[in-house]
Amino acid sequence: GENVEQHPSTLSVQEGDSAVIKCTYSDSASNYFPWYKQELGKGPQLIIDIRSNVGEKKDQRIAVTLNKTAKHFSLHITETQPEDSAVYFCAAPRTGANNLFFGTGTRLTVIP
Amino acid sequence: EAGVTQFPSHSVIEKGQTVTLRCDPISGHDNLYWYRRVMGKEIKFLLHFVKESKQDESGMPNNRFLAERTGGTYSTLKVQPAELEDSGVYFCASSSRRTGLRVSYNEQFFGPGTRLTVL
């Protein structure tokens, strides 16, 4: 938590290609890293999360990797589809609290 | 199961006026959070309720913001008087409380947000 940086701010990919969004965090005590997807007119929705005791987690076309040494984690979307177009946010918890620090968001556009 | 709901969806007010935002969390969720996103920036934490008690209000910008959660159900966030920099999207989120853990990171379910524009 404390500070979460997210890149890129915008990303356009062709349908079927992969998309990767990267985040870094500053608090080495952070141990939970969720990714949220926000579609137009809706609130952020959790799509995948990872805890610090694993380095990778996969759920169908979505995967998240975590490098605790480097303090960064990434979202990977394979075989992108137009419905993947949205704003994606990474987050990390504030140490000792339940609230989250969010990145600035990545607007992903999948071009049909 | 109904999700988190927020009212209104949009609000346009003039500087100096008062606005009250409402959040209805998922039934049974003890934790309720308020966040705000100013255009193009990160979603920033404002405060956290556990039932009717303010657990953490370290993110509240100043004393023009007042949040309440009477009875531990719905919550309101009042801005009085509103300033131009208060414009943004205000999100409410709720989560259940896992017992037996000192800090538990349960999924936070977000509402659709209230877009506040202060002119």
Image: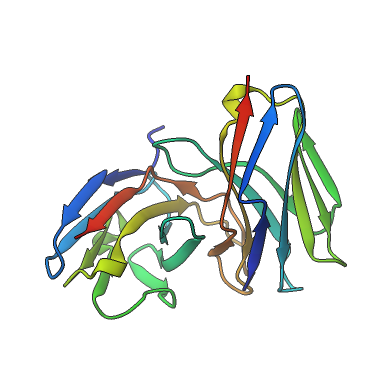
Instruction: Please give left or right for residue A112 compared with residue B86 in the image.
Output: right
Query: Where on the picture, by quarter, is residue B21?
Result: bottom left
Up/down of A24 relative to B89, above or below: below
Instruction: Please give left or right for residue B80 compared with residue B24 in the image.
Output: left
Residue ID at (58%, 53%): B106
Instruction: Please give left or right for residue B71 compared with residue B42 in the image.
Output: left
Up/down of B7 relative to B76, above or below: above
Query: Where on the picture, by quarter, is residue A18?
Result: top right
Percent x, y of residue B41:
49, 60
Query: Where on the picture, by quarter, is residue A70?
Result: bottom right
The chosen color scheme is rainbow
Pick the quarter of the image with the N terminus of chain A: bottom right
- Which of B6/B82 is in front? B82
Residue ID at (24%, 46%): B10
Instruction: Please give left or right for residue B23 compared with residue A8 in the image.
Output: left
Identify the residue at the far bottom of this view.
B63
Percent x, y of residue A109:
60, 33
Q: Mark yes or no: residue B74 visible.
A: no
Percent x, y of residue A81:
65, 23
Up/down of B111 relative to B45, above or below: above
Residue ID at (52%, 51%): B108
